[in-house]
Amino acid sequence: MKDPVARTASPYTDPTVKGPRSQQLHSGHLSEARKSKYAVLVNTVNKTGLHPGGVQPVMEHTELEEELHEKAHIDYDRVAIIPNPSVAALYEDALVYETGTAITESGALTAYSGKKTGRSPLDKRIVKEETSENDIWWGPVNKPMTPEVWKINRERAIDYLNTRNRIYVVDGYAGWDEKYRIRVRVVCARAYHALFMRNMLIRPSREELEHFHPDYTIYNAGSFPANRYTEGMTSGTSVAINFAEKEMVILGTEYAGEMKKGVFTVMFYEGPVKHNILTLHSSANEGKDGDVTLFFGLSGTGKTTLSADPNRALIGDDEHCWSDRGVFNIEGGCYAKTIGLSAEKEPDIFGAIRYGSVLENVVFDPETRQVDYDDSTLTENTRCAYPIEYISNAKIPCLSPNHPTNIILLTCDARGVLPPISKLDSAQTMFHFISGYTSKMAGTEDGVLEPQATFSSCFAQPFLALHPMRYAKMLADKIEQHGANAWLLNTGWVGAGFSQGGKRCPLKYTRAILDAIHSGELAKVGYENYEVFNLQVPTSCPGVPAELLNPKKAWTAGNDSFDREVKKLGGLFLENFKKYESEATEDVIKAGPVV
Ligand SMILES: Nc1ncnc2c1ncn2[C@@H]1O[C@H](COP(=O)(O)OP(=O)(O)OP(=O)(O)O)[C@@H](O)[C@H]1O
Ligand SMILES: O=C([O-])CC(=O)C(=O)O
Ligand SMILES: [Mn+2]
């Protein structure tokens, strides 16, 4: 599969359209509801003696079909609506209707997302309407969309869905805490997208699905582009959320991550605004004594990798809420990066890639069906989505009544000047949380090919709905109330930066650092002050060479380049923080680097 078919966002080259409708009706995919519907049709025809195709017969529609018809004008007489299909049915459909979709050696379904292999943050918009506009952070990420443009795009998505022979509906919850969960419905054209969201949402029981009425609905028409001449569109891609209508519309990108991150933005809005709970871009796990650790960090910094820990139960790998009742995962699955994945280094994740999991944009051998996890031909951002129970020590239900004991801010510093581990006081925690520094690595966002210094407030800027300081203040209050310890952990370069030929901190050392935090040993060792950033770094850590702990001592590329790099990064932090200074307290402003 070295040269897969590049799918473009056009319905005309969309290989998912195959086979006449009559074939589908007999394809064995009909749900019970569908079958009884056709039984009704047959009965009507028999009773009236009318030939089908003459007078329009009276057809009975399911509750779900009626709802979709009423809310979204889905043409249920033309399109087969497949409600909450099984994994097996989705496999069958994906294999029949989608170009390049296949089963890999380990049993996972592998699919291509087409041209877009990462999120498109520049094409994300929020509808400007009165119920939410005073709360929304109309900052660098949330671009306003007028209600008129929303209607145009929504209609375009629905028109596209109505041209399909079959569309899928996946219903699920976001949030394991029943008090705070939202019900989400996904309506999409690709079986791969349906299976992805079946994995990523929390799966309701069969009974719960029977009368499931969503709070939010996602219309994913990603194979079909937005019209670039529609006012405000800057490309053929549009990912839009309407908080008043409680809907999301996707056009012009088939990257599945947009759906899960769309739900996340909804939680970033609903959590604080409606329930006074804090939404966080973090993973979480729990030790044997019930101690909870949260790992905040941007894409690629290690949330998924480090939260999968054989000694600790996994609560979740990417999206959590911290409420007055502890911590809960938003999702029912994990979405792991698979580039460079190996059974030796990351056995839990490797083992989760099996029947039911969805691999995205990986390269595999068409004969042996073996996946080459080192191959980044299609993208650096190769991924796998699997249900969380595929991690054997996942804690189900995925929540803890305990408040976090440790808070770990992850960063992946490609300059190699942030220490592998530092202990933070509360002002430093706020400074670094608001700053949200990492080197953005190639892949998860469209167009990023080399590491770039990036500051993403709350480690979540592309997903935030409200101003970052609203989340930061909530976090400060919670940390103070529950007395959590905070750490800054750099999973990035050590010894020298990316540009000086340094290397990324070996995973085994990062894991040893975490073990020492969890065993309490790291709190007991000696500390020294690390220049410019004024961070407290340990002078020793079990399982880690001591010389790695202080970047100045670890640096192999000459003192001049070290001084230059550390000051340059310090300067970037200060420059970035200026925009928050008017709202931050004096001690937080002072907790930044001194250049
Ligand atoms: N020292 C290290 N610590 C953590 N991860 C490392 C380290 N060295 C290399 N890696 C690799 O970095 C990647 C971290 O990706 P991971 O999926 O954990 O990111 P994430 O924070 O969950 O991102 P996203 O929010 O995009 O899902 C993995 O591919 C992992 O193998
Ligand atoms: O959303 C995605 O595509 C992957 C992810 O977790 C992130 O970028 O934080
Ligand atoms: Mn993420």
Image (cartoon, grey):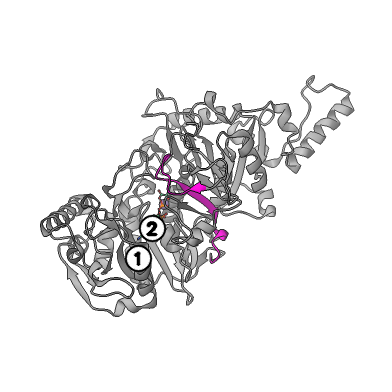
- The quarter of the picture where residue 74 lies is top right
Q: Which amino acid does label 2 sit on?
A: Gly
Q: Which amino acid does label 1 sit on?
A: Thr
| Of 152 and 515, the residue lying toward us | 515
Residue 375 sits inside the magenta stretch:
yes
Q: Is residue 172 above or below residue 313?
A: above
Q: Do the residues labelled 2 and 1 touch (CB within 8 Å)?
A: yes
Q: How many labels does the image show?
A: 2
Q: Residue 510 carries which label?
A: 1
Q: Residue 302 carries which label?
A: 2
Residue 4 visible, this angle:
yes
- From the top left corner, tell me how far across and down residue 436 is, in percent: 29, 54
In the current view of this chain or complex, which residue is farthest to the bottom? 524
Answer left or right for 52 relative to 474. Answer: right
Q: Residues within 10 Å of mark 2 (few under 14, many from 20)?
A: many
Is disc 1's CB within 8 Å of ligand 1?
A: yes
Q: How crowded is mark 1: few (under 14 residues within 10 Å), some or many (20 or more)?
A: many
| Of 554 and 300, the residue lying toward us | 554
Is disc 2's CB within 8 Å of ligand 1?
A: yes
- The quarter of the picture where residue 530 lies is bottom left
Secondary structure beneath dot 2 equals: loop
- From the top left corner, tell me how far across and down residue 418 is, in percent: 23, 60
Q: Distance between the residues labelled 2 and 1?
A: 10 Å
Tell me the residue at 73%/27% (across/down): 22
Q: In this view, does 550 lie above or below 349?
A: below
Answer left or right for 67 relative to 23. Answer: left
Q: In this view, does 274 lie above or below 477?
A: above
Secondary structure beneath dot 1 equals: helix
* Ligand 1 quadrant in view: bottom left
Please report the bounds of the magenta region as a residue range.
371-393
- From the top left corner, tell me how far across and down residue 565 is, in percent: 16, 54
Tell me the residue at 44%/58% (across/down): 304
